[in-house]
Amino acid sequence: MAREDIYADLTQLGAKTELPASPDEAVLERVPNPQAGTAYTVRFTAPEFTSLCPLTGQPDFAHLVIDYIPGDWLVESKSLKLYLGSFRNHGAFHEDCTVSIGKRLAETLAPQWLRIGGYWYPRGGIPIDVFYQTGPAPDGVWIPETGVAPYRGRG
C-alpha cells in the first residue's frame, strides 16, 4: 500500500471540521500502522481536557495521558483532538469520562496495549485520579512513566 493510500479514507484531516456536540457524535478515525509488527509506544497528552459535572453543570478539568502500543491501526490525531473536545459540554463523572475514552480507543484501534491516566483537578478540595488499561504491558517495549505528579496544591 502506498503511503498516500493510508490517508485516503480520512474525512476530518485537512478539512474544516466542527467540534462534535457529544462524544457519541464524534468520529474517531484510524489509519493503517506503517510500522505494524514493530512494538513501540505512542503517547498523547491532553493537559487541558474539560467536561462537565453531570449534576451541577460546573466545568471539570483534567490532564490526560494516553499511551498505546499499536497493532494494525493508529489513531488519527485530529479526530482524537475533536473527540476529546466533544467532552467539553458532556456531563459525566471523572471515572466515566476516563474509562469511556480508554474503551473507545481500544475498541477503535485494537491495540496491543493501551492505558489512560486521568489526573483530575480538585473540585470540593479533592483531586481524583483515574487509571484504565487493557491488560499487562507487553515485555520488551519502553513505556515511560506518565510524568504527572500527584496533586499537591499550592507550594
Image (cartoon, grey):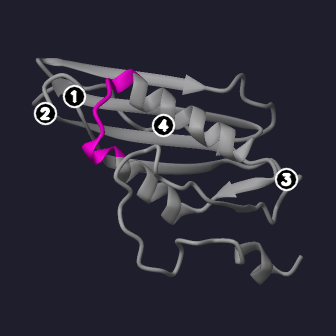
Locate the N terminus by quadrant: bottom right
- Secondary structure under tag 4 reads loop
Secondary structure at numbered mark 3: loop
Return the x and y of residue 53 as percentages of the image width and height.
21, 28
Marking on residue 53? 1
17 vs 27, left or right, is left
Mark 3 vs mark 1, CA separation in Å = 40 Å
- Residue at mark 3 to residue at mark 2: CA–CA distance: 43 Å
Disc 2 residue type (three-letter): Gln
Q: Are marks 2 and 1 in contact (CB under 8 Å)?
A: yes
Assess disc 1: are there few (<14), some (14-19) or many (≥20) residues with their C-alpha within 10 Å of its C-alpha: some
Q: Which residue type carries mark 1?
A: Cys
User: Measured along the vertical axis of the image, is residue 78 above or below residue 152?
Assistant: below
Q: Which residue is mark 2?
A: 58
Dot 3 or dot 2, earlier in sequence: 3
Q: Return the disc, 4 or 1, that comes first in the chain's sequence.
A: 1
Image point (28%, 32%), residue name? 91
Marker disc for residue 38: 3
* Distance from the alpha carbon under mark 2 to that under mark 1: 5 Å
Q: Residues within 10 Å of mark 2 (few under 14, many from 20)?
A: few
